[in-house]
């Protein structure tokens, strides 16, 4: 690695330290993922070794681990979301969630470093780093994602709408959004989540090759909404999914039933949601929508 870095720095006419600093978010992401991949639950050599290597190549030795994370926090979080977008199974996702849970208290979370610079010891040497509380979603991770959701979704939307991005890049970004929604299961979504997510999915649903995947994300999103947000967004959400009915009925019908039938069957219909349901007068006559139409006609057609 050292020789490759030296040659690259020579060709680009930059110092090795400059190259490392410019790509700090990629380096730190890899170091923390390597740590999170260690099944022993102990601090391994990945992070200390990586820091030593960077210092040996000219990176300022007075920079703490938290300083390094802080200088690229936004890019680092974006990189972790993209890695989540590339994750192909529970094991890989668990590793990435653990890496995020380790990164947040060490340097990503602004305002938590009350005791000064944080070193590798902040990761919990001698303790179980891969404990159940860190390998999945938790309140700390949800709070951090919620606080940075606008930045995350704008980053993903830019990739999804870019004319120069490949289909694979866009699928990765869309899966990244799905993983972010997975993290928020059991948490509370603010009103900004509704607007940003809907704006993103509206654009993606217009791209035919991404429709099926986008409908999967929409289904996931709908099931996270509380009754208030569901009432507020019922008509736009319904109209987003409905045009895809002819080509993707197997995905669209569960979304529409989650909006209309399931709240009714669960007895979880607020006054606001009942009013919104009564305004759904444009449901087409389609065999697959029998339960949706029956629920609307029997329970909400006369709601005022």
Image: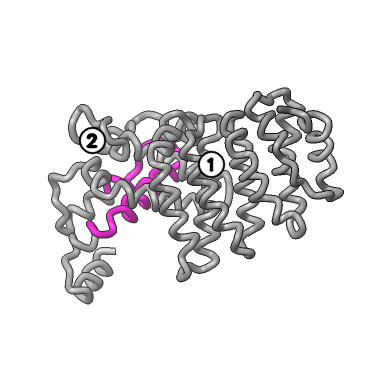
Q: Is residue 13 left or right of residue 269?
A: left
Q: In the figure, 146 relative to 81: above or below?
A: above
Mark 2: which secondary structure? loop
Q: Is residue 214 magenta?
A: no
Q: Position of residue 288 (x, y in %)?
A: 83, 48
Which residue is at a point 61% across and 47% down the rendered structure image?
218
Q: Give, as a single range, the part of the protein colored magenta.
A: 21-49
Q: Quadrant of the N terminus?
A: bottom left
Badge 1, how many Cα within 10 Å: few under 14, some, many 20+? many
Q: Which residue is mark 1?
A: 181
Between 245 and 7, the one lying in front of the other is 245
Between 124 and 24, the one lying in front of the other is 24
Q: Position of residue 240 (x, y in %)?
A: 64, 50
Q: Is residue 145 left or right of residue 174?
A: left
Q: Which residue is mark 2?
A: 118
Contact, mark 2 vs mark 1 (Cβ under 8 Å): no
Secondary structure mostly seen in magenta is helix
């Amino acid at each position: 690695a050292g020789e490759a870095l030296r040659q690259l720095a020579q060709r680009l006419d930059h110092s090795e330290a400059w190259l490392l600093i410019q790509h700090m978010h990629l380096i730190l992401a890899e170091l923390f993922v390597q740590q999170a991949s260690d099944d022993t639950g102990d601090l391994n050599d990945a992070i200390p070794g990586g820091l030593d290597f960077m210092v040996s190549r000219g990176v300022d030795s007075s920079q703490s681990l938290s300083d390094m994370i802080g200088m690229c926090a936004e890019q680092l979080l974006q990189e972790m979301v993209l890695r989540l977008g590339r994750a192909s199974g529970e094991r890989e996702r668990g590793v990435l969630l653990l890496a995020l849970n380790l990164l947040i208290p060490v340097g990503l979370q602004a305002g938590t470093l009350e005791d000064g610079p944080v070193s590798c010891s902040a990761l919990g040497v001698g303790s179980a780093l891969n404990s159940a509380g860190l390998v999945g979603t938790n309140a700390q991770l949800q709070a951090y994602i919620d606080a940075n959701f606008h930045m995350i979704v704008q980053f993903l939307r830019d990739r999804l709408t870019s004319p120069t991005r490949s289909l694979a890049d866009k699928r990765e970004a869309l899966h990244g959004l799905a993983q972010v929604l997975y993290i928020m299961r059991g948490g509370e979504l603010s009103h900004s989540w509704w607007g940003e997510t809907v704006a993103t999915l509206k654009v993606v649903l217009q791209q035919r090759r991404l429709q099926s995947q986008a409908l999967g994300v929409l289904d996931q999103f709908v099931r996270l909404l509380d009754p208030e947000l569901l009432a507020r967004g019922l008509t736009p959400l319904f109209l987003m999914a409905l045009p895809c009915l002819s080509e993707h009925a197997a995905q669209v019908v569960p979304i529409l039933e989650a909006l209309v039938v399931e709240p009714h069957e669960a007895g979880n219909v607020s006054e606001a949601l009942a009013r919104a349901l009564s305004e759904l007068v444009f449901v087409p006559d389609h065999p697959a929508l029998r339960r949706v139409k029956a629920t609307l006609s029997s329970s909400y057609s006369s709601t005022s």
